[in-house]
Amino acid sequence: MNRSTLPMRPLGDTGIEVSCLGLGTVKIGRNLGVKYPQGFSLPDDASVRNILALCKDAGMNLIDTAPAYGSSEERLGQLLEHRHDWVICSKVGEEFQNGESSFDFSPAHVRHSLERSLKLLRTDYLDLVLVHSDGNDEDIIRNSDCFDALIRAKEAGLIRAFGMSTKTVAGGFLALEQADVVMVTLNPTATDDAAVVAEAHARHKGVLIKKALNSGHVMTDADGAAIDPVRASLEFVFSHAGVSSVIIGSITPEHLLHNIGCAVEVAGAPQS
């Protein structure tokens, strides 16, 4: 293996293999209402193509998008080449319009959202679809029938796997009873979901990690000295058995290559 090639890991028992880093694409479609230390401009088409090429050259195959990410799905549909080389993860449940989020977890909206994503992404299937939680994880799972709608979509061949991007530990545990995959928050300053990761590993379910780099916030050691937040965060995350991939949202080539380099060094093979 080339030393710059990202290791691959199984996405639970879905039969899908993903690179240990995946590209989060909110920053190619939306720069309003996002929680980053600094503002940013959306990259132009040439810059997005360059980012996608750098990812592919490094062995990255996972792309994470969502209807709530502004024009992300539409731009990926236009700019992403060789679709079958990529594992595409999108979401249902959250919409973002006029600077505000709204949520609809009804089966009818799930179906509408899936059909729109397929059209925008110019594909006839999605590898993974996650419910984009509003924070009421347990209520969504128990009372909205959105999981049933995703199960039907999976049976129809529109999606290969489904899960939930959760915001609570209890929601993560409940999602694992039906879902193929969970997306949870894990970094050195947010460790509650480590229990969900461990349970997912025990159940052979896939785990995607969001906010692993704490959205770019600076980290310090016990003496207050600045440390490389990327390496420290990835070392922490990959120390947890069961992590399939970490989603990172770099749109700056230098940052992206640094993230990839750190992941290659610390990820290694998935723990058994």
Image: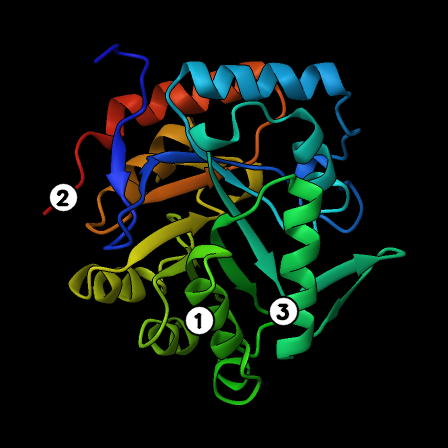
Q: Position of residue 184 (x, y in %)?
A: 42, 58
Q: Identity of the amino acid at label 3? A: Val
The mark total stands at 3
Specify the farthest residue to the top: 2
Helix, strand or loop status at disc 1:
helix
Residue at image mark 2: 271
Separation (CA) of disc 3 from disc 1: 11 Å
Q: Position of residue 218 (x, y in %)?
A: 53, 35
Q: Is residue 99 above or below residue 265?
A: below
**Which marked residue is nearer to the observer: mark 1 or mark 2?**
1
Q: Position of residue 81 (x, y in %)?
A: 57, 23
Category of crowding for the residue at label 3, using alpha-carbon neighbours closer than 10 angstroms: few (below 14), some (14–19), many (at least 20) = many
Tell me which label, 1 or 2, sits earlier in the chain.
1
Q: Is residue 129 left or right of residue 175?
A: right
Separation (CA) of disc 2 from disc 3: 35 Å
Q: Residue at x 44, y 63 (%)?
A: 154
Q: Position of residue 10 (x, y in %)?
A: 25, 44
Query: Which dot marks residue 151?
Result: 1
Quadrant of the rendered structure where residue 135 is? bottom right
Q: Is residue 188 above or below residue 29?
A: below
Specify the farthest residue to the front: 156
Tell me which label, 3 or 1, sits earlier in the chain.
3
Instruction: Report if residue 225 is visible in the image.
Output: no
